[in-house]
């Protein structure tokens, strides 16, 4: 259950008609909560391992939502498999505001992320795109291939932040 932290209160200039601005409960809501992202991939599903974790936080003001993710694949049972890793969002994005797809397909970049591997000095900065109505895909800077098992040797860490418009029917 989301934690409600307040409401946006509209401000009116002197002489404005109060009917000029109508905010619904959804428009005014300020909420935040945690969620557990889902990590999927083409050609296999990565396993986080005994010491790994999938953590997500979100904060929403009206229909503007910020999401932070922190994913670690480590320990016994970790499986670095698959290509084109995808990470879920807690709510559907508004597809009238965001295009979906992959790199070079006019998809919106909605945030940034960093990745690194336990045995690699290669840190990667990634652009984050909306790949489906409730899903993100990550492209390393300067690459035309999204992140996947080939980006990590042992262990993997992905941290990122995105800002999206949420579909109004979600609330």
Image: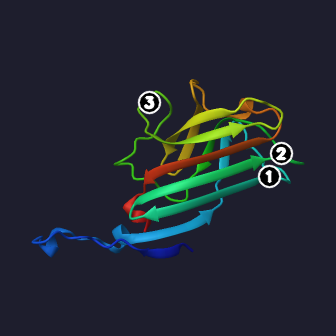
What residue is rendered at 39% in x and 53% in y? 94
Label 1 sits on residue: 52
Residue 147 visible in the displayed image: no
Quadrant holding the C terminus: bottom left
Name the secondary structure under disc 2: loop
Q: Is residue 21 left or right of residue 100?
A: left
Name the secondary structure under disc 3: loop
Label 3 and label 2: CA atoms lie apart by 32 Å
| Label annotation for residue 105 | 3
Q: Residue furthest left?
A: 15
Label 3 packing within 10 angstroms: few (<14), some (14-19), many (20+): few
Label 2 packing within 10 angstroms: few (<14), some (14-19), many (20+): some
Task: Give how far across and how far down residue 46 sits, in percent.
Answer: 75, 43
Label 1 and label 3: CA atoms lie apart by 33 Å
Label 1 packing within 10 angstroms: few (<14), some (14-19), many (20+): some
Label 2 sits on residue: 78
Q: Are marks 2 and 1 in contact (CB under 8 Å)?
A: yes
Task: Give how far across and how far down residue 146 sits, in percent.
Answer: 60, 32
What residue is rendered at 48% in x and 69% in y? 31
Q: Of discs 1 and 3, which sits in the foreground?
A: 1
| Label annotation for residue 111 | none
The image shows residue 167, relative to residue 74, as above or below, that is: below
Task: Give how far across and how far down residue 10 sits, in percent.
Answer: 27, 71
Quadrant holding the N terminus: bottom right
Q: Are marks 3 and 2 in contact (CB under 8 Å)?
A: no
Label 2 and label 1: CA atoms lie apart by 8 Å
Name the secondary structure under disc 1: loop
Task: Of the two numbered discs 1 and 3 on the same chain, state the one appearing first in sequence.
Answer: 1
Task: Of the two numbered discs 3 and 2 on the same chain, state the one appearing first in sequence.
Answer: 2
């Amino acid at each position: 259950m989301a934690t409600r932290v307040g409401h946006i209160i509209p401000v009116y200039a002197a002489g404005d008609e109060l009917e000029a601005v109508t905010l619904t409960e959804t428009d005014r809501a300020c909420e935040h909560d945690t969620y557990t992202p889902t990590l999927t991939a083409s050609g296999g599903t990565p396993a986080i391992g005994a010491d790994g974790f999938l953590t997500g936080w979100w904060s929403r003001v009206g229909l503007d939502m910020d999401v932070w993710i922190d994913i670690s694949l480590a320990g016994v049972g970790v499986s670095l498999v698959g290509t084109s890793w995808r990470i879920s969002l807690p709510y559907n994005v508004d597809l009238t505001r965001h295009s979906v797809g992959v790199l070079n397909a006019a998809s919106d970049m909605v945030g940034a992320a960093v990745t690194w591997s336990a045995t690699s000095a290669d840190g990667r900065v990634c652009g984050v795109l909306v790949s489906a109505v409730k899903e993100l895909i990550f492209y390393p800077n300067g690459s035309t291939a999204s992140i996947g098992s080939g980006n990590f040797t042992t262990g993997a860490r992905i941290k990122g932040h995105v800002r999206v418009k949420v579909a109004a029917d979600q609330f």
